[in-house]
Amino acid sequence: MSLQHIRGELPMVYVNVVPVRVDATGQVTEVGLLLRADDDAISRALIAGRVLYHERIRDALIRNIEKDLGGVALPRIPASPVPFAVAEYFPTKGVTPFHDTRQHAVALAYVVPVDGDCEPSQNALDIVWLSPEEAGSEEVASDMLGGQHTLLRQALAHCGLIA
Amino acid sequence: MSLQHIRGELPMVYVNVVPVRVDATGQVTEVGLLLRADDDAISRALIAGRVLYHERIRDALIRNIEKDLGGVALPRIPASPVPFAVAEYFPTKGVTPFHDTRQHAVALAYVVPVDGDCEPSQNALDIVWLSPEEAGSEEVASDMLGGQHTLLRQALAHCGLIA
Amino acid sequence: MSLQHIRGELPMVYVNVVPVRVDATGQVTEVGLLLRADDDAISRALIAGRVLYHERIRDALIRNIEKDLGGVALPRIPASPVPFAVAEYFPTKGVTPFHDTRQHAVALAYVVPVDGDCEPSQNALDIVWLSPEEAGSEEVASDMLGGQHTLLRQALAHCGLIA
Amino acid sequence: MSLQHIRGELPMVYVNVVPVRVDATGQVTEVGLLLRADDDAISRALIAGRVLYHERIRDALIRNIEKDLGGVALPRIPASPVPFAVAEYFPTKGVTPFHDTRQHAVALAYVVPVDGDCEPSQNALDIVWLSPEEAGSEEVASDMLGGQHTLLRQALAHCGLIA
């Protein structure tokens, strides 16, 4: 039984993270986006990853943030496990704003302030920090795949930052 | 002691409501906007009003929805009193996305499905029902005052409807 | 590849529903609990069920509510897909307040007002409507399995109903 | 025009804060309660205070936390201004679970992790840190006034910590 096989049978549990820098009043000052190289094209992405069997969502958040931002990012995992949004990625386009050719994934999405140094690791070429205005722009949206710009804008809206 | 005088001394408690039509799965199909004529100009607006002394937020929601949509709108007040957003209207521009020359108002914002007939009453010329896409457009945004288009987009984002 | 096999390998996506009756102001007046007979014992339960492959959460909510309350319950699925809580059921006790011997399930939990007639179907013996106070009591808690009374109390708290 | 006079005419905007200690995964490990001496009796209380004219909620949170925990508590104000609960304190008992003889106050409630040293200041005799279980107990509830134990339990429920 392969993971690839199961992916055609059941929805997978994911976490999506929008890493942010905040000031002393908690206001978001910068949004972090990963720069990825997939299939010859450069794209911007949120932190995303599976929740493993017998893994708490909190632990999946820590693990996936470390995977993409390194071990000294000092993420502030929220005290409440309630996500700000649920992104339903479908293998078929148009069912929801979210799309993933590989699978049906249900992603719980969180805004996570990070205080420490962030270093791109594994698949990411770089981490770029943008102002909330830049992050919500059409230009950035056009560099994101699978509808993640929709989730990014939902995050900005949740933080009171969308114009 | 006049209300006008107090408005220069204390923040006022408001409710803001985004009325919506939903289908059987709860998905928002239409967003209602009021057409108002203020100071020679036509603008689009959300339902807004004060919470009165000794009035529960639930009752303020009902009262203000009836004021703007009439008595047979059949609003579905949420079971939870937690707002999807808090809009802080300041008399000074630029402190937050929200602005009200008359006062400092803290508005608790709710998305409220309405099932019944809606008739404009009092200050509203008309109620227009738009698709979520239209409601979130730049064109509609330019017809709204005081930053209410920001709140409208926050509502769409909360309902998973922003692109 | 059997479902039973996968259940030992991956977390499953579930929905949990607390059905409620509300008054005209949206205030919860009654909470519905299913009466189930499992393994010789009678227990009280929330509505629960899997999200299927290529099924939206909204559609999973409708389907599972119909399964347990019948086809004329007229559920009011929320306009926003954000759950009030995420219940992580682990096959091992003590990791979270939630426990399921069969699997690791991540359940998105919703409070859903129902307006129509509810009839127990399939596994449920009956549906009992309790006041919020009764629903939150120790007596009811002792009749619920897998930590569901914790989720029920979270729902009451979310609706401002816990004492 | 005195504040006392206005308090009989209009609802006041408040913030309520549940200060917590969290571990690296964001899980709440301790809840902070203020020990107050009012009218000969000792009571436990949450952080509470008015939002001033032309003050953002974020700034009111900082100011009121500093007032009660001192200047080096290092509070982590949430990135999102959406409260986990809205507590409506009425001068009359029984309208809501919340009661304040002086006024009608609408309090936006937040769970705020604090990292630094906390020192009681002004009205508080001491700050006591309790486990979530202790904080939610009947014993602690009986030491709290105006329904604040209800809000405390709502906070615990929101963080997935209520049994």
Image (cartoon, coloured by chain):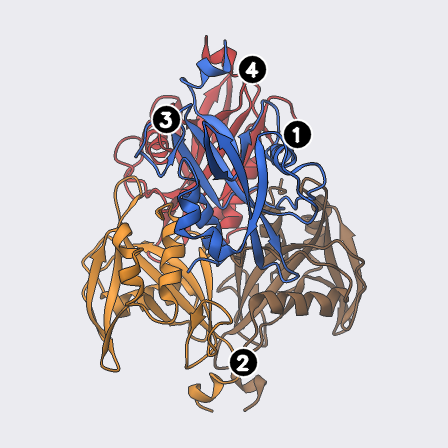
Chain colours: A blue, B orange, C red, D brown
Label 3, residues with CA under 10 Å away: few <14, some 14-19, many ≥20? some
Q: Locate residue B110 relative to residue A23 in the image: left or right.
A: left
- Tag 3 residue: A91
Pick whichever of labels 1 and 4 is earlier in the sequence: 4
- Tag 1 residue: C95
Amino acid residing under circle 1: Val
- Tag 2 residue: D7
Residues marked 3 and 2, same chain:
no
As rendered, which of B100 and A144 lies closer to the eye? Answer: A144
- Image location of residue C162, percent across then percent down: 54, 50
As rendered, which of D96 and A98 lies closer to the eye? Answer: A98
Q: Is residue D35 above or below residue B131?
A: below
Pointer 2 chain: D
Q: Is residue D90 above or below residue A54?
A: below
Amino acid residing under circle 3: Pro
- Tag 4 residue: C8
Q: Nearer the viewer, mark 1 or mark 2?
A: 1
- Image location of residue C42, percent across then percent down: 49, 24
